[in-house]
Amino acid sequence: MSELKNPLEIYAALAKTNCGECGVPSCMAFAAAVLQGQKKIGACPYLDREVVAQLSRRIVQRRSLEDDHQQAIDQLQREVAALDFAQVAPRLGARLVDGNLAINCLGKDFIITPSGEMVSDCHLNHWIYVPLLHYCIVCQGKEAQGEWVDYGTLPGAAEWSQYFSHRCEEPLRQLADAHRELVFEMFDIFGAQTLPSSGGADHTLVILPLPKVPFLINYWEPEEGFDSKLNILLDRSAGENINAQSINLLARGIIEMFRQLILRHSRDGKLF
């Protein structure tokens, strides 16, 4: 008996009346909801019991992004629970506090418990949770070499490079264009170190999303006839202290955090 993995296959078995009695507005939406586990196939009033039973045995529900994310966190927590915190703290650049790991992220402490739970005065979200746990497990404690490279040159980063450019560097450039003073003020609040100009950039600064994973940010302000530019470079050592996907998540987390702060503190409460 073949499995049903596509909503179109479920839709083909429905009456296509779009009656809404199942609780969703259309039969196609109902088919998608069934596949995602949000609805039972028996909620359709036009299917008899035998057909419902047959379809139920064949439906393979899709995992949601939330399910996949939670599964990743659960696995990372199990691996963290197996660590000797006293042994790993020095290579992470972390501190031991009452048997927990205190890891500084952008000037704020995040506490990792022996069971892999995370506690902080800051808002916790998945942008930071997965990278921090992964950092605890894989970081080799490699010190920064002062050799700044494009994200895409790091091990395993090639397939994520375009995503990093479009979802991390470009949104940060747009925020800096629209709220330059506020954005660089926030960088300062989060412990950014200003460096001499790199490549003629108007602003060059280093931030520490994780103790052994520095980001170098260069921003060129717009000039007449020329658009602004922004890039995020990584120290060559980053590839030995965390993986490429986690770097992506860290950068996205910074963008999302800045967006929320701008909405809260800008004069008009708007991003753009």
Image (tube, rainbow, N blue to C red):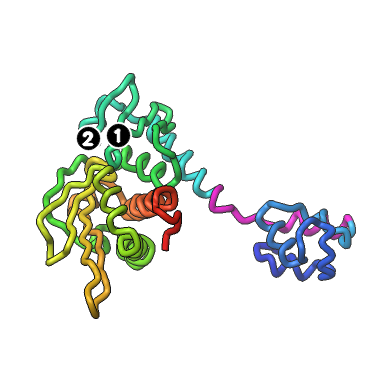
Q: Quadrant of residue 42?
A: bottom right
Along the line of sight, which residue is nearer the eye, 95 or 156? 95
Q: Position of residue 245 (x, y in %)?
A: 36, 54
Q: Amino acid at mark 2?
A: Gly
Question: Above or below — where is 214 with respect to 160?
Answer: above
In the picture, which quadrant includes the C terminus? bottom left
Q: CA distance from mark 1 to mark 2?
A: 7 Å
**Numbered tag placed on residue 103 in the rendering:** 1
Q: Residue at x 12, y 66 (%)?
A: 199
Along the line of sight, which residue is nearer the eye, 66 or 54? 66
Secondary structure mostly seen in the magenta stretch: helix
Helix, strand or loop at disc 1?
Answer: strand
- Evaluate if marks 1 and 2 touch, with contact meaning CB atoms under 8 Å apart: yes
Q: Position of residue 16 (x, y in %)?
A: 81, 70
Horizontal relation, residue 100 to residue 90: left or right = right
Task: Give the farthest residue toward the left.
Answer: 196
Which residues fall within the magenta stretch? 49-66
Horizontal relation, residue 167 to residue 242: left or right = right
Marked residue nearer the N-terminal end (1 or 2): 2
Q: Give the crowd class for mark 1: few <14, some 14-19, many >=20 residues within 10 Å.
A: many
* Visible residue check, residue 213: no
Q: Does 139 lie within the magenta span?
A: no
Q: Residue at x 29, y 34 (%)?
A: 103
Q: Residue at x 38, y 62 (%)?
A: 167
Q: Position of residue 96 (x, y in %)?
A: 28, 24
Q: Position of residue 28 (x, y in %)?
A: 73, 67
**Numbered tag placed on residue 93 in the rendering:** 2
Question: Above or below — where is 142 with respect to 99?
Answer: below
**Numbered tag placed on residue 224 in the rendering:** none
